[in-house]
Amino acid sequence: MDALAGITKSLEDVYDGDAWHGPTVKKVLLGIPASQANAHIGTGHSIIELVLHMAAWKDFATHKLRGDIAFDITEEMNFPKGKNWAGALETLDNSQQGLLSALASFDGQKLESTVPHRKYSFYKLLHGVAHHDLYHLGQIVMIARRFQAPPNNQ
């Protein structure tokens, strides 16, 4: 398996594939009710904000893979305030599909090239997207567990 195929497989597995680490991003998110989407711990970001943040960085990678040199993440895009849980899930799913589509047409020889206006390579960016998803997935699981209803022992 070449490097690009390996990265693609990792991104697929983390999101909705055969993840070794436990439940995938999609499986966890589909188990969170809309009533918990705005849950957060302390001054941290809410679940919906984390989901939209994940989507924003997938979109960033997609734009860069497609050669959009000028695209960048603005403050408003980085942790947007979401209101619609179903819409946020759809946004994340669309960003995942867009990233996989961009990867399918990306020249793997360019993986070691520097991402425009950054100090890291496409290789590092793409691995970073998978790591980023897992990092925020851990946060989401912790938030969701904190606000789960206690089991009914009747």
Image (cartoon, rainbow, N blue to C red):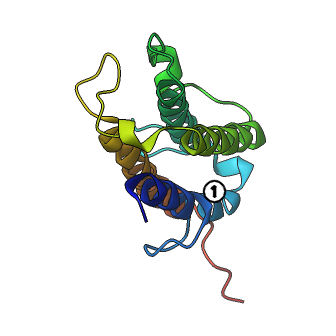
Q: Is residue 144 above or below residue 73?
A: below
The answer to whether residue 42 is visible is no
| 97 relative position to 19: left or right | right
Q: Nearer the viewer, residue 79 or 63?
A: 63
Element type at marker 1?
Answer: helix
Image location of residue 117, percent across then percent down = 31, 16
Q: Nearer the viewer, residue 51 or 130?
A: 130
The answer to whether residue 150 is visible is yes
Image location of residue 9, percent across then percent down = 51, 61
Image location of residue 103, percent across then percent down = 54, 42
The residue that appears at 75% across and 37% down in the rendered structure is 87
| 43 relative position to 67: left or right | left
Q: Quadrant of the C terminus?
A: bottom right
Residue tagged 1 = 29
The residue that appears at 35% across and 45% down in the rendered structure is 128
The residue that appears at 49% across and 27% down in the rendered structure is 60
What number of labels is visible? 1
Image location of residue 69, percent across then percent down = 44, 14
Kindly identify the amino acid type of the residue bearing the numbered disc 1: Leu
The residue that appears at 74% across and 41% down in the rendered structure is 90
- Residue at the bottom extreme? 154
Q: Quadrant of the N terminus?
A: bottom left
